[in-house]
Image (cartoon, grey):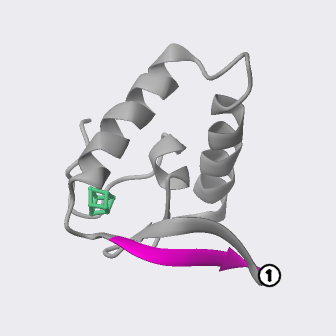
């Protein structure tokens, strides 16, 4: 995942926790993607750390991206094309 996608994914993830939330289309996209990832055998329980700090407990075993940030990045693609277009 590119730096731009990583940043976008984390920013959207943080926004999703705020009262104003995300635009409905991004929220819907993230929910659909997350459902697929949670049922995917490649989602691994493997911490993601940045500068020694754990920022996520899961990652995709195919692309290595942090879950759930990856599902919030509109330009990110599933490496095996399981997400809706
Ligand atoms: S991004 Fe794709 S391959 Fe990775 S966990 Fe999600 S559905 Fe599975």
Q: Callout 1: 10 Å neighbours few (<14), some, many (20+)? A: few
Q: Which residue shows up at 61% across the image and 23% down it?
A: 22
Q: Quadrant of ligand 1?
A: bottom left
Q: Which residue matches tag 1? A: 51
**Residue 50 belongs to magenta span:** yes
Which residue appears farthest toward the right when viewing the image? 51
Q: Which residue shows up at 46% across the image and 67% down it?
A: 58
Q: Quadrant of residue 23?
A: top right
Q: Which residue shows up at 45% across the image and 51% down it?
A: 76
Q: Which range is magenta? A: 44-51
Q: Quadrant of residue 21?
A: top right
**Residue 18 belongs to magenta span:** no
Where is residue 52? Give x, y as percent: 77, 84
Residue 29 versus residue 64 in the image, above or below: above
Residue 59 versus residue 23 in the image, above or below: below
Q: Secondary structure at mark 1?
A: loop
Where is residue 62? Give x, y as percent: 31, 74
Q: Looking at the image, which is closer to me, 58 or 32?
A: 58
Residue 67 versus residue 18 in the image, above or below: below
Disc 1 within 8 angstroms of ligand 1 (CB): no
Where is residue 66? Give x, y as percent: 52, 64
Q: Which residue shows up at 20% across the image and 50% down it?
A: 82
Quadrant in which the C terminus appears = top left
Residue 79 versus residue 25 in the image, above or below: below
Where is residue 25? Give x, y as percent: 46, 19
- Image side of residue 55 versus residue 58, left or right: right
């Amino acid at each position: 995942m590119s730096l731009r996608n990583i940043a976008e994914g984390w920013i959207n993830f943080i926004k999703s926790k705020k009262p104003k939330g995300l635009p409905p289309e991004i929220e819907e996209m993230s929910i659909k993607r997350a459902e697929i990832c949670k049922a995917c055998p490649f989602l691994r329980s493997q911490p993601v750390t940045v500068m020694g700090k754990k920022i996520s407990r899961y990652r995709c075993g195919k692309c290595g991206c942090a879950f759930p940030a990856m599902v919030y990045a509109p330009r990110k693609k599933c490496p095996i094309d399981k997400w809706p277009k």
